[in-house]
Image: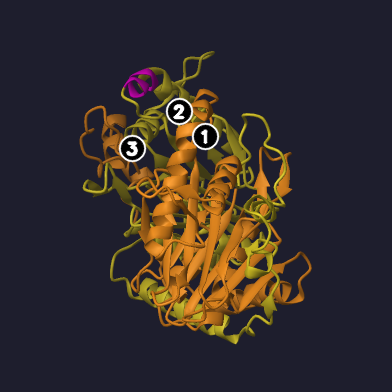
Chain colours: A yellow, B orange
Amino acid sequence: MTYCVGLKLRDGLVMISDTRTNAGIDHISCFRKLHLFGEPGERALAIASSGNLSITQSVISLVTEGMPDPDTGQKRTLNNVPSMFKAAQLIGEAVREVYRTDGPSLEMHQAAFDVALLLGGQIKGRRMRLFMIYSAGNFIEATGDTPYLQIGETKYGKPILDRAVTFETDLYEGLKLGLLSMDSTMRSNLAVGLPLDIMVLRINAYQPELVHRIHAGDSYFEELSKRWSEALRASHQAIAQPPYKGIAGAAYTSPENKSKPAKKRHDDVVKTAAKRVGPKPRRK
Amino acid sequence: MTYCVGLKLRDGLVMISDTRTNAGIDHISCFRKLHLFGEPGERALAIASSGNLSITQSVISLVTEGMPDPDTGQKRTLNNVPSMFKAAQLIGEAVREVYRTDGPSLEMHQAAFDVALLLGGQIKGRRMRLFMIYSAGNFIEATGDTPYLQIGETKYGKPILDRAVTFETDLYEGLKLGLLSMDSTMRSNLAVGLPLDIMVLRINAYQPELVHRIHAGDSYFEELSKRWSEALRASHQAIAQPPYKGIAGAAYTSPENKSKPAKKRHDDVVKTAAKRVGPKPRRK
């Protein structure tokens, strides 16, 4: 598994990824999933990847070595595409190329063609953008309304982002919130683990101002995790106890209705239920 | 979708479930998923259910109407089984019975046989127990090490439980934490929604002391959600900014290595990668 998150904030971009890969719980390794591209002062791009490692590595190779332009034959790489949109298209194209070569064989071995990538960055004279590219090579973009995108094991770390991150969030506050989101994920899922790769790219800088790997035992990260746990405890303790009292149970098979025949009691239990909707199941 | 959580704490049991069901995003309904059984002073049991609604309703019907004992022919219901373990077995048997009758048809319609149930409660003279019953009719039990069990959309609400709930947690503090876990889930997933059904059963009481439905607009629940958001914001703001500085990027294709041939640069980018592990994909 993997967890990567990208935040596109007013002041710039934050990208964070873990480094744990696993082929079964007994086959865990450390692989870089945050890849940086560009030329300082001209362009800075970062890709975070999740899914099948053979696919993501092939995609990274293709966009690094370059893919020929079908019209001009010129090699297009992340270091020469003219815009972030073209960069996202190039990655989408690379995903489709890997699907063309590896997809059928993977499917023959019951392995899903599973890949998702975040692409963030800025090219001189253009605006900063953050995209998420799917297995089909299509992509979406982060906006002011939803300034963050996640790939991999996204659910554990989503509540803190949903509550705290806005487009106006300060760049390093965003990094901190991303690290809290990552910490929540790592506590709940062993398949996401240290070290973490982080990158901060300020708007109109065209080179990252921070590229760092947080290893196990990092004192700030340990303190962050500890202080967050303490703060959560203090926070929930400070909220008043639930005021609800007594019993009001529509589905309670109490002695009061013992005299009813079994069928009637059963009807009470499921009395809110309606007719079954054909063979298509309602999902709870 | 559904989210239900059960906490078996030193002082008793808390069970919470939402009531939203959906068959597609345009077919959303409200169904009770928390079902109570028992006789005050003698036994109190509760089932929370998730998965295919037609399956869970059939299971509830079977354990309410009773299933014949293969040896004696006597009808076994949740109101007459002698122990919580037997109650869990009875539910497992009901799940297998529904699989026998509905499973093949569901599979012919590409609908998975998807069901999970929580069973909590206490029978006079026996200890309080909390079980989770799976689609195969097998089950596990909450313990002092892991005092809570979840079914349905479990991930968004797990971090708060992982950090804050222990076996020693006070009963109403547990209810509050369960509601926070539910609130986190509802904010991140529209398929989980109000109203909520809650139950508190104190140990050796053999009847719930609280059975309540929390509707939209409930002032305590709204306040809980608001105060929790405020507290999270204050908490992350109180943590120091990340101290990391500068650039240390193994995978950065900067001008320094522009002179290297493309193949070499690519090797730098993926230099932490090892050989591909046969056709079985490594998962990130």
Are both tags, 3 and 2, on one chain?
yes
**Mark 2 element type:** helix
Q: Check the image and name the residue furthest to the right.
A: B217
Describe residue A40's horizontal placement relative to residue A165 as left or right.
left
First-in-chain label (2 vs 1): 2
Disc 3 crowd, CA 10 A, few/some/many (<14, 14-19, 20+): many
* Residue B63 place in picture, x, y as percent: 52, 52
Do pointers 1 and 3 mark residues of a single chain?
Answer: yes
Three-letter residue code for mark 2: Val
Q: CA distance from mark 2 to mark 1?
A: 8 Å
Three-letter amino acid code of the residue under disc 3: Leu
Give coordinates of residue A240: x percent, y percent. 64, 85
Q: Subunit of mark 1?
A: A
Residue closer to the observer: A119 or B198:
B198
Residue A95 badge = 2
In the rendered structure, the answer to whether residue B66 lies left or right of residue A189 reads right
The residue segment tinted magenta is A103-108
* Disc 1 residue crowd, few under 14, some 14–19, many 20+, Cα 10 Å: some
- Which of disc 2 and disc 3 is earlier in sequence? 3
Q: Residue at x 29, y 45 (%)?
A: A22
Q: What residue is disc 1 on?
A: A134
Q: Quadrant of residue A203?
A: bottom right
Q: Amino acid at mark 1?
A: Tyr
Asked whether disc 3 touches disc 2, contact meaning CB atoms under 8 Å apart, the reply is: no
Determine whether B175 is above or below A120 in the image. below
Whether residue B69 is situated above or below residue A226 in the rendered picture: above
Q: Chain of mark 3?
A: A
Disc number at residue A205? Answer: none
Q: Are marks 2 and 1 in contact (CB under 8 Å)?
A: yes
The answer to whether residue A212 of the structure is visible from this angle is no
Q: Residue at x 72, y 43 (%)?
A: A274
Structural distance between the alpha carbons of marks 1 and 3: 15 Å
